[in-house]
Image (cartoon, rainbow, N blue to C red):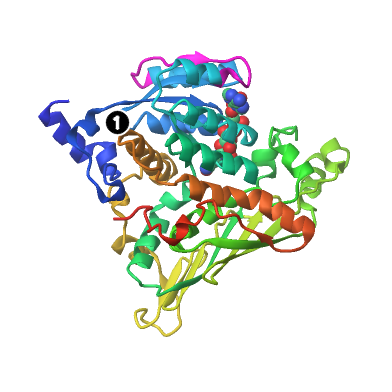
Amino acid sequence: MGKVSRRNFLKTGSLAAAGVGLLNGSAFKPDDLVKSIRIGVIGAGNRGARHISTLLTIEGAEITAVCDLVDSRTMNAASMCENAGRKRPSIYNGDENSYKEMLDKENLDAVIIATYWNSHAEIAVYAMKNAIYPAVEVPAALSVNDLWQLVDTSEKTGIPVMMLENACFRKDNLALLNMKRLGLFGEIVHCHGAHGHDLVDFWFYDRKNGEPNWAAEYLLKYNRDQFPTQSLAPLMSWMDINRGDIFTEIYSTASASKGINAFFKREFGVNHPAGNLHYNQGDVITSVLKTKAGKTVILNTDIQLPRPFANSWMLQGTKGIYNEEKDGVFLEFKSPEYHQWEPFKPYEEKYCHKWWQYDYSSKFNDGTDFVMLSQFVGAVRSKGPAPVDVYDSAVMSAVIELSGISIEKNSPVLFPDFTRGKWQTNSPRFAVE
Ligand SMILES: NC(=O)c1ccc[n+]([C@@H]2O[C@H](COP(=O)([O-])OP(=O)(O)OC[C@H]3O[C@@H](n4cnc5c(N)ncnc54)[C@H](O)[C@@H]3O)[C@@H](O)[C@H]2O)c1
């Protein structure tokens, strides 16, 4: 890239636009900006294809290999690359172990893992052992044992791993992080997050005929918070979890399971076989998490009753409070009316994070995935730490198994310290300006 085009790239290019190169406050050297990275994608279904389409808009992100169980999905992924004027990636199909051949043979810098939940950890571990930087879809793993494997492998190999949880990259949540770091909320003492999203026929069952997809088995087998990462993601940096504080325990409870059976009766009549099964999964899971510093979090996952979508994020400190559902904020001595909400939008603009000081309105998901993947590409290129590191990925994902144990025992469960004590000296790093 010549001087002029590099200047154009810096002005309009996606990496510069997203603030890539400024991770940890350090600027990229010019050479880093021109270095392409070779990325493989494993799992080219809904989310994997979406990542491919976003990566194709990120300068220097070359998709050189794609793997899926289903031929038509790898073909589709390859066509997407060709249609964007890129080289056709190598294709790997066959069975659930074909990814190993891809990771062994291809000279990859990074891999995106967007497969079913049960294979994320295994594939990420294999990638790290091959010195390939993995970005793994949510959750990073389903069990605490597998999460420890991720932590141990990352520490042993020196290869970072990032969970692709995008909620912490949102414009609103990053503006709140800036506000929190400027002390506008005082000391944070309590937060709330929820995944309120009717997913029965969106994720678990086919809308047309009620046939189960791969995730449906989890509703039959388990009773736990199946989707904690989205609700928890922004809270991690709002509360300095793993960086000054840690979760010490979680106490979860589940409502009765009525929603899935009611869905089938409503949509398919009383004789649909899935409508007469026994589902272990309660409709609404509520967890209380406590931190070492005595702060609290309430998480709700509510995915099988009819309802509008909601994250219900809330951030509360000694000087003020933010409430996503009210789209409002109240700051003591700053908000114009005593103990009244004022609109959050002006704050979102005023405290806009530098990753968001560009217009992403034409991009999918308002640009949140673009910001997240740009940060990942930047981290791989600079061989830097993962923006969402293995410890944060582990904490967010651990809620799945721990909430299930807590519900079963009807008692609080201790939270593991994946940092092995480093939380006491680690300083905040995510999105530090
Ligand atoms: N962060 C988000 O906003 C978001 C949104 C949707 C999905 N997701 C996550 O993305 C992941 C995938 O979900 P999806 O909706 O794309 O599912 P999907 O079923 O559409 O796609 C999964 C793909 O993975 C392939 N696959 C499974 N095991 C494989 C293996 N061992 N090797 C190669 N390919 C394999 C399947 O053939 C399928 O094409 C899940 O972990 C899900 O939680 C995240």
**Number of marks in picture:** 1
- Callout 1 environment at 10 Å: few (<14), some (14 to 19), or many (20+)? some
SS assignment for the magenta stretch, majority: loop
Most foreground residue, 428 or 376: 428
Most foreground residue, 171 or 384: 384
**Ligand 1 lies in quarter:** top right
Q: Within the image, what quadrant is residue 209 found in?
A: top right
Q: Is residue 49 left or right of residue 332?
A: right
In this picture, which residue range is highlighted in magenta? Answer: 83-99
Query: Which residue has dot 1 on it?
Result: 59
| SS label for mark 1 | loop
Going by the numbered disc 1, the residue's amino acid type is Glu
Q: Is residue 375 above or below residue 92?
A: below
- Residue 113 point in image, percent of width and height: 52, 31
Q: Is residue 281 above or below residue 373?
A: below
Q: Within the image, what quadrant is residue 58 found in?
A: top left
Q: Residue at 79% across / 42% down in the picture? A: 220
Q: Do we see residue 209 in this rendering? A: yes
Q: Residue at 59% across / 31% down in the picture? A: 122
Q: Residue at 55% across / 27% down in the picture? A: 43
Q: Is residue 403 left or right of residue 234?
A: right
